[in-house]
Image: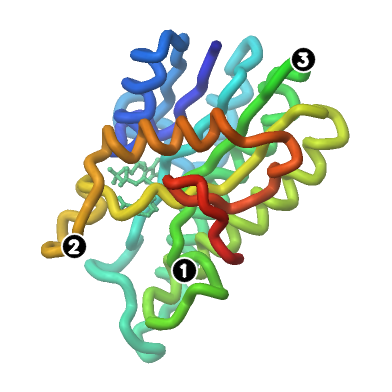
Amino acid sequence: MRALVVGESGGIGAAVAAELRARGAEVVGLSRGRDGFDVTRPDVAEAQIAALEGVFNLIFVATGALVSTRVRPEKALREVSAEELAGQFAVNAIGPALVLRHAPRLLARSGRGVFAALSARVGSIGDNRAGGWYSYRASKAALNQIVHTGAIELARTHKRAVCVALHPGTVETSFTAGFAGREKLTAQESAAKLLDVLDGLEPEQTGGFYDYSGARVVW
Ligand SMILES: NC(=O)c1ccc[n+]([C@@H]2O[C@H](COP(=O)([O-])OP(=O)(O)OC[C@H]3O[C@@H](n4cnc5c(N)ncnc54)[C@H](OP(=O)(O)O)[C@@H]3O)[C@@H](O)[C@H]2O)c1
């Protein structure tokens, strides 16, 4: 089992990489902090992905950001700005897309090949009752569409591929440090659950959006 973890420096990314290693996988990690893999510099990111050799049984994209130019996500329409929308799309939607575009080459064709990207339940339009968080929500909804569309294409050449968006739960990382009082999973708990979910998914379930318990999240 060979896995690529993009965003290995993150709270969930590090835990996913550690859990994979504990389960006996060979893990190749890529991250902004350690390798300069910055998705807001698409030419740099693209070159690093293009330089990867060999095939992977799992590509796990764990990058993402809650805000780009702001301190907190927007609460009201008057706070919406082109800069924040563009920043969030660059990291949360375009970033994983830059990795996914290499999945046809990087994912194993014989046997099972899994591509998973960390989305967020708040990217669900059907589940949105609270409003706010315009840029983050919209960028994750865009990511979901990209993953779903990629799954359709991948299925044509990789018959047993699974390509999905995942909601990791509310997880104790630097990402949620500003949200006190919420019940949070540890990154280790979330990582183990997400990997169990991926292990249990069948090719017929490709293109879906699943949470850490394996339940489908409404689009
Ligand atoms: N934590 C939660 O409760 C929660 C809930 C729902 C969804 N999620 C999603 O889960 C994912 C990971 O979250 P986390 O909690 O692990 O957050 P985190 O600890 O803040 O990790 C974020 C990761 O994204 C990377 N990153 C940020 N901007 C980047 C850029 N421009 N280019 C490349 N990499 C970039 C970071 O790299 P460096 O550290 O190297 O800069 C880090 O590896 C995110 O997509 C988030 O939306 C998290």
Q: Position of residue 168 (x, y in %)?
A: 39, 47
Q: How many marks?
A: 3
Which residue occupies the extreme right position in the image? 156
Disc 1 is placed on an element classified as helix
Which residue occupies the extreme left position in the image? 181
Image vertical order of residue 14 relative to residue 208, above or below: above
Image vertical order of residue 84 relative to residue 44, above or below: below
Q: CA distance from mark 1 to mark 3?
A: 36 Å
Image vertical order of residue 106 relative to residue 82, above or below: above
Q: Which residue is mark 2?
A: 182
Which one is nearer the viewer's eye here, 115 or 197?
Answer: 197
- Neighbour class for label 1 at 10 Å: few (<14), some, many (≥20)? many
Residue in the image at 34% along x and 59% along y:
66
Mark linked to residue 110? 3
Q: Position of residue 165 (x, y in %)?
A: 56, 48
Which residue occupies the extreme bottom position in the image? 78
Image vertical order of residue 80 relative to residue 62, above or below: below
Q: Position of residue 89 (x, y in %)?
A: 51, 60
**Left or right of 201, for residue 140:** left
